[in-house]
Image: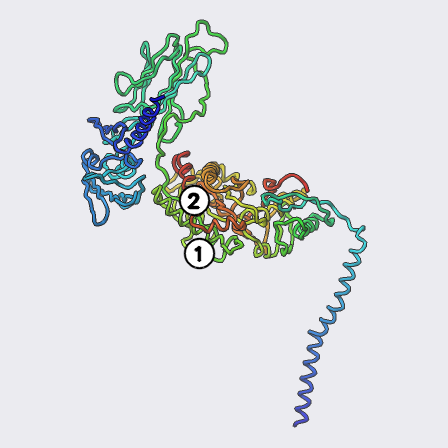
Amino acid sequence: MKLRAPVAALAAALCLLSTVLPAQQSAAPPYTVVTREARRPLATRTIAGQEMFALDDLARLFSLTVREDAAAGGLMVTAGAQTIVLSTQQPLASVSGRMISLPAAPVRDGRLWYVPVDFVSRALASILPGGVELRKPSRLVLAGGVRLPRIAARSDAIGAGTTRITIDVAPPTPHTVTQEPTRILVRFDADALDLGDIRIAPGDTVTAVHQGDAGTVLAIDLGPRFGSFRASDQPAPTPGSARIFVELLAQTDAPAPGVPLPGTPVPIPAPDAPPLLDLPTPGGLRAIVIDAGHGGDDTGAKGAQGTLEKNVTLGVARRLKGALEARLGVRVLLTREGDQAVASDQRAALANNNKADLFISLHANASLRPAVAGAQVFYLNLEGYGDVAQRAAQATADALPVLGGGSREIEITPWEMAQARHLDQSAAFARSIEAALRARVPMSARALQQAPFRVLVGANMPAVLVELGFLTNAAQEKQLIGDEHQNTLVQALVEGIVRYRAATGAGGTR
Amino acid sequence: MPRRNIAVAGIVVFAAAAAWFLFIGLPRWYAARRAPDAAVSTAATAAPSVAIRKITATLYYLSDDGMTLVPAQREIPFGASVVEQARAIIEAQIAAAPPRLSAIPAETKLRDVFITERGDAFVDLSGDIVTKHPGGSLDEIFTVYTLVNALTVNLPAVTRVQILIDGKEVDTLAGHVDLRHPLAKSLEWVVHDTQ
């Protein structure tokens, strides 16, 4: 009984220590900088929840010059003729004149400046001649064009004594598969391998999968009942990666009906398995067009207090533009900058002409029933358009004669039906936006809908129309004109876009 | 000379009076005579209501929660041809029917209906459906599909409906639903319990 108080005090002290310590020093292992010639450690520090590199360390490793411009509140990082200007106040940097965002602003400690680890991938990668790649999961920084493919593998029993080893490789790397008495070797044309998640259930035909004696070989150790194998390249699970199947067939004493003979090709359907590698999105988004609904004489819906839809949509559109530029570093265009009328065709045309990856039309709703409230997300419904839309969706290729003779296959889609080819992406985009809005604002009972909306038909990219709320509902009208709610909506829309980007890679089918 | 002036003045006054009588007075009097006739004739046809054939049609109104259209069975005048029947349906659908709430502004007037051999109906409405519309995509969807469904559900000869405003094709009513093409029936927005 007497012991209890000191033990409790000790426990409390330990708890306190454990919360204080990580803020002081980072417990995380260092990153490894891999070049063709060497591997060097690169320490990180966690400052205010952000993992950071010392700018001096990066300068030494990559021959950068760093100059502080105290008067302008900036840090100039130069490699060759290219320069990054880092703001010391805000999480922003200008890379060769292009603005990008960082998770946090640089932090000064004594004489040293620290930058978030993402500085390497978002800023440094653009200015270093050989490029540089940050691999957070394996804590690597790859420089000088070193080829270090990421590898993940998994085993699945697919019946009839067959085990399938699925190997995902990113980026796609040339490889050969050879058999030795006790193992199968998958040899990659690379400088080294970055082994990720290897999930193998040991069995009769396979006992383990590991890195081989040579650093660029993946070895599959065979079990006692192994008979033969089949290797095949499969469709890429995600852009920027490749998938290999190595199927191990067990020995069979007497071929039973239905059991495949070793060596006979058996069509085994490749399941639509999720990617094994957690890859960063290739390319990402470049441009987004935000359409502030209505404008000019077309005031849109009107609230009881006189709030006009055109003003709400413009207000949210402007905020969203700022948030997207700062957080995602993408180019954002508005279909109208002020209170002017814009034709429907012009709205989609702006997005098409600027090769936008996404199109979002913002609106505020109205109902004859004042109780109706909640946000809604729409994507296009082509049912009403009949066979014109059907043809557009199939996008038949026509052979057209070209200059100098011959012909070339060209996809012809009626301009005003451009959206027909993007409906699947638009549906996914709408789902992402709806889910993100649902987490933050009240939603309508029919939150995700399809409708034949005029402004969406001509958009040649994933496109959605978002109804932010009902102006005819007194409580929502008040919310929709308020800064707080508009910011919440913007936050949700940014999250929806981030979710969509994460789920699909880049901007859809372009 | 003064005599001659008086004569000229007299002729001018007479000519003016004659002109007034001929071009203004006579038509007014004639119109006034015709009006009671017309009133009598409609009254005469309306009085023996038993004689007027009626049919039951499905019309659409806004649900209490405002989130769907609700079908309602209504007696409407019988139309001898498909076009006349279409007119009767649209007119009944536009007419206020308290306590039911219609998604079509009550001020809207039906100008004309055309039906093509392919089964496309063109419903020409007065501009009131635009100017009196409260806006908002949800109610616009309801307004459009009230009209589209009222015709396609009741008339097998009509498969698609295009809305015209004051005789012209339009982009939209209130900025959302694409009206440049005829629209097919959609029960997506209709709840299926008949009132």
Question: In the rendered structure, the residue with mark 1 lies on which chain?
Answer: A
Question: In the rendered structure, the residue with mark 2 lies on which chain?
Answer: A
Q: How many marks?
A: 2
Residue at figure coordinates x 73%, y 50% from the top left: B77
Quarter where residue A232 is shown: top left
Q: Which of marks 1 and 2 is nearer the N terminus?
A: 1
Quarter of the picture holding the C terminus of chain A: top left
Residue position for label 2: A488
Residue at figure coordinates x 39%, y 8% from the top left: A225
Task: Give whichever of A106, B122 is nearer the camera.
Answer: A106
CA gap, disc 1 to disc 2? 23 Å
Where residue A171 appears, as percent x and y from the top left, is 32, 28
Amino acid carrying label 2: it is Thr
Q: Tell me if residue A308 comes above or below residue A9 in the rendering.
A: below
Mark 1 crowd level (few <14, some 14–19, many ≥20, 10 Å Cα) = some
Where residue A35 appears, as percent x and y from the top left, is 22, 28
Quarter where residue B110 is shown: bottom right
Mark 2 crowd level (few <14, some 14–19, many ≥20, 10 Å Cα) = some
Where residue A66 appears, as percent x and y from the top left, is 19, 41
Question: Are the residues at dot 1 and dot 2 in contact (C-beta closer than 8 Å)?
Answer: no
Q: Judge left or right: residue A138 versus residue A443.
A: left
Task: Give whichever of A308, A79 is nearer the camera.
Answer: A308
Is residue A372 in view? yes
Q: Is mark 1 on a helix, strand or loop?
A: loop
Residue position for label 1: A339
